[in-house]
Amino acid sequence: MIAPYLGIHPSAVIEDGAQLGQDVNIGPFCHVGPGVVLGDGCSLHSHVVIQGETSLGEETEVYPFASLGAAPQDKKYAGERTMLVIGARNVIREYVTMQPGTHGGGGVTRVGDRGLFMVGSHIAHDCQVGDDVILVNHVSLGGHVVVEDFAIIGGLSGIHQFCRIGRHAMVGAHSMIVRDVLPYTTVTGPRAHLAGLNLVGLKRHGFDSDDRRQLQDILDTLFAEPGTTEQRLEEIRRLNGFTSDGPAQNLITFLTQATQGRGFTGPVD
C-alpha cells in the first residue's frame, strides 16, 4: 500500500463521530462523515469523500475523487438509515462510486476483501460483492447485483439490476449482462453470450483436470439438446463423481437458483 500522507492532512475534514483506526492516513481535502468507520491502516488519497453509515476494513486504500456512501440513485430511497460495508485490503481507484443499500433491498451494500475496483467503476445500492473481485475501468453494477468471489468484469461492461455473476467467472470488456453469468465460465459480447469455461482463470487458481472435466460435462449436458433447464438439471444430477462442496456442485446449485430468477447467459443461438 502507498500511504498518500502520513497522518491526517490539515486540510482534511473529519466530522465529529467518525471512528478512525490506528495508523490511518488521510490526505489533503478529504471529507469523512460522522457515521464513517475506517479500519486500521486505511489510506485515503486526496479529495476522497466518504459519507453515511460507511465502514472500510483494515488496509483499504482509496484514490482521489472516489465517493463512498452517498445516497443511492434510487427514486424510492427516502433518506432511511442504510449501510455500505467494505471489507479489508481493497484498492479503490479514482472516481469509483459505491452506494449504500435501500430499505427495499435489505439495507446493506456489501463489498468483500482484497478487491480491485478500477477507475470509474460503480457499485449501486444493495449489491453484494464477494472477495478477490476485480471491476475494470468504468464497469457499472445496477442495484441488487450479486458478484461472487474471484469474478472479473471487463472494462465498460454493464450489469443489469438483480443479475448474479458466479464465482471465478470472467466477463469480457464492453459486455451487456442482462442474465446471470454461470460460475467458472466466460461470457462476452455487446449482448453477452457464453463463450465456454474460464480455463485460464481455473488453471491460475489451481483447479485440476478432473474439476475442469466435470464442469465441462455439465455445460455439455446443459446445452446438448432442446429441453427446459429443469430437464437438463435432472440429467446433470444423474452424473457421477461430484463432491458435495466442489466446483461442479457449486455450478449445479447456481443453476438451480437461476431457474427462479433472470435465467442465465447461454451460447449464441
Image (cartoon, helix red, strand yellow):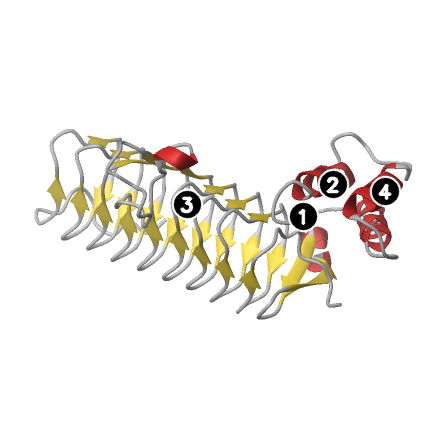
Q: Position of residue 152 (x, y in %)?
A: 56, 55
- Residue hosting label 2: 247
Q: Are marks 2 and 1 in contact (CB under 8 Å)?
A: yes
Amino acid on which disc 4 is placed = Ile
Q: CA distance from mark 4 to mark 1?
A: 16 Å
**Count of numbered labels shown in the rendering:** 4
Amino acid on which disc 3 is placed = Asn
The 10 Å Cα crowd at callout 2, few under 14, some 14 to 19, many 20 or more, is many
Q: Are marks 4 and 1 in contact (CB under 8 Å)?
A: no
When asked about the image quadrant of residue 173, the answer is bottom right
- Residue hosting label 3: 90
Q: CA distance from mark 2 to mark 4?
A: 14 Å
In this view, the mark in front (4 or 3): 4
Vertical relation: 12 (above or below) 121: above
The numbered mark, 1 or 3, whose residue comes first in the sequence reads: 3
Residue under the image location 19 percent in, 55 percent down: 47
The 10 Å Cα crowd at callout 4, few under 14, some 14 to 19, many 20 or more, is some
The numbered mark, 2 or 3, whose residue comes first in the sequence reads: 3
Amino acid on which disc 1 is placed = Pro
The numbered mark, 4 or 1, whose residue comes first in the sequence reads: 1
Identify the image quadrant of the C terminus.
Answer: bottom right
Amino acid on which disc 2 is placed = Pro
Residue under the image location 65 percent in, 40 percent down: 260
Residue under the image location 61 percent in, 49 percent down: 262
Q: CA distance from mark 1 to mark 3?
A: 22 Å
